[in-house]
């Protein structure tokens, strides 16, 4: 029972900034003031009305969707391989899966950028998806 309370307290502590940001995104006033002057969707309309922000949002959602789909397929394939491989193959698969976690994301990102530059690959949405899959 105590563990459950501690876990829920930590979860609430971690999620509280996100909840506050979401609540204040509906605030009618341009400044952060409390109590609320009223609720409004004005800020969302401004974001959706801006062509550059709209295209950036669409590209971000596309990258996230493709990354999620590819990592889902790779994760399912890795789990099936884990079941079928012997101890040596499992150890290799474990190293391949844990290496991106052990390396700092900035190091992996810069390494991928250098790799794409050396291979003369044009940076595009595809290279962004590949980089996100490697980091995921």
Image (cartoon, helix red, strand yellow):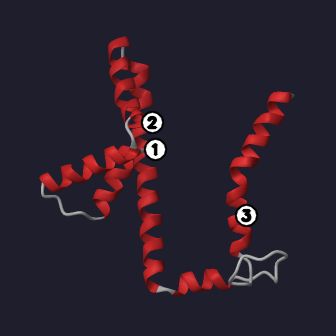
C-alpha gap between disc 1 and disc 3: 31 Å
Q: Quadrant of residue 97?
A: top left
Question: Could you say which disc has been placed on residue 72 in the image?
Answer: 1
Secondary structure of the residue carrying tag 2 is helix
Does 10 sit above or below residue 83? Answer: below
Left or right of residue 120: residue 68: right
Q: Quadrant of residue 126?
A: bottom left
* Circle 2 residue: 76
Query: In what quadrant of the picture does the N terminus appear?
Result: top right
* Circle 3 residue: 20
Earlier along the polypeptide chain: callout 1 or callout 3?
Answer: 3
Left or right of residue 83: residue 114: left
Circles 2 and 3 in contact, beta carbons < 8 Å: no
Circles 1 and 2 in contact, beta carbons < 8 Å: yes
Secondary structure of the residue carrying tag 3 is helix
C-alpha gap between disc 2 and disc 3: 36 Å
Secondary structure of the residue carrying tag 1 is helix
Task: Name the residue at 19% across, 49% down.
Answer: 115
């Amino acid at each position: 029972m105590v563990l459950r309370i501690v876990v829920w307290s930590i979860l609430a502590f971690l999620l509280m900034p996100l909840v506050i940001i979401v609540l204040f995104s509906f605030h009618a006033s341009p400044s952060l003031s409390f109590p609320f002057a009223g609720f409004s969707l004005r800020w969302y309309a401004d974001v959706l009305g801006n062509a550059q922000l709209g295209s950036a949002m669409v590209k971000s959602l596309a990258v996230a969707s493709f990354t999620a789909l590819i990592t889902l397929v790779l994760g399912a394939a890795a789990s099936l391989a884990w079941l079928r491989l012997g101890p040596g193959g499992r150890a290799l698969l474990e190293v391949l899966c844990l290496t991106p976690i052990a390396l700092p994301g900035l190091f992996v990102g810069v390494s991928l950028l250098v790799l794409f530059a050396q291979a003369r690959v044009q940076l595009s949405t595809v290279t962004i998806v590949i980089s996100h899959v490697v980091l995921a």
